[in-house]
Image (cartoon, rainbow, N blue to C red):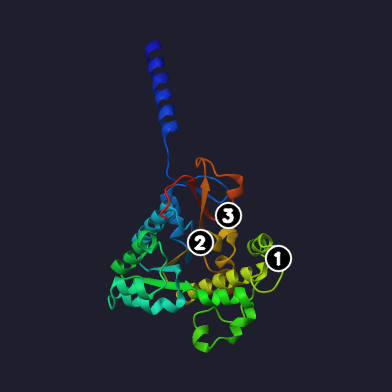
Amino acid sequence: MKRSVLIAMVLCFCFEFLSAQDKPAFKLFRKEGKPIEYQKMIAELAKADVVLFGEMHDNSINHWLELQVAKDLYAINPKLTLGFEMFEADNQLILDEYLTGVIEERHLLSEAKVWDNYKNDYKPLIEFCKTQKLNAIATNVPRRYANLVYRKGIDALNTLPDEALKHIAPLLIEIDLELPGYKNMISSMGGHGGPGSGENMARSQAVKDATMAYFIIQNLTEGIFIHYHGAYHSQNFEGIYHYLKKENPNLRIVTIHPVSQDVVDKLSDENKNTADFIIAIPTDMTKTY
């Protein structure tokens, strides 16, 4: 009897030791901080019209999960569309030409305004679209127009020709600078109006959010639309989420938000309620650039 108790104690110690040595690359949580298994999250994402997948642009685990989620949702519902902040709306034709084989990758890289980390971080998603013959949507406002708002204010968009306006959410874009995200941006820049002001920076951000939401709405199908963007654009159910709900309150939207923590076994209080699902990633995780 004593021997069996001793064995049980040793096994318990070994289990505890091994658990302590476990070093997960990430951990998933619900918004209130309750852990959730990956497959359960996928099952819930599969019920959505839109999945807003925020990212830390240089995070390797974040990008790997983006691809895994796309593959697993495609297995459930092949009517999948992927949308990208990383491609500007005026490059949609170039992106379509690459996906359909009209042009080669070298043309995509030279003629579209691809991000410097494209090959490491976004090429796998684009190649997935190409292989599975899925639509990839360039949703972001051309950066020159976002910069125009930052330099001259929102009214400067009214000076653009009709051809340019095709790549921006329809005017007038309603901007609520009292939303916490925009308000914090203004505060961090010291407020005040005028060129290069915090208000204009927030307005520029809002134009991006509104435009991405607009092109998501324009490209919805019976399937699931996954949109990839910097975490700030949907954090705390603001940004793109705000404009999607404003346009269609009945949309089923699920948000995913990454956070960086020294320890990922428990979600920090300040990271709770930032999204429906939160990815806790170790602070020292390998960066892609």
Which quadrant would the N terminus be assigned to in this image?
Answer: top left
Tell me the CA gap for discs 3 and 1. Answer: 25 Å
Q: Is residue 281 above or below residue 131?
A: above
Q: In this view, does 45 lie above or below 172?
A: above
Tell me the CA gap for discs 2 and 1. Answer: 23 Å
* Rendering coords of residue 288 (x, y %): 41, 54
Under mark 1, the amino acid is: Gly
Which quadrant would the C terminus be assigned to in this image?
Answer: bottom left
x 52%, y 59%: residue: 231
User: Is residue 8 found left or right of 151 in the rendered image?
Assistant: left
- Rate crowding at label 3 as few (under 14), some (14 to 19) or many (20 or more) other CA atoms within 10 Å: many
Nearest to N terminus: mark 2 or mark 1: 1
Q: Disc 1 designates what residue? A: 191
Which SS class for mark 1? loop
Residue 238, by quadrant, is bottom right
Question: Which residue is more in the foreground, 205 or 70?
Answer: 205
Furthest-right residue in view? 192
* Rendering coords of residue 283 (x, y %): 49, 45
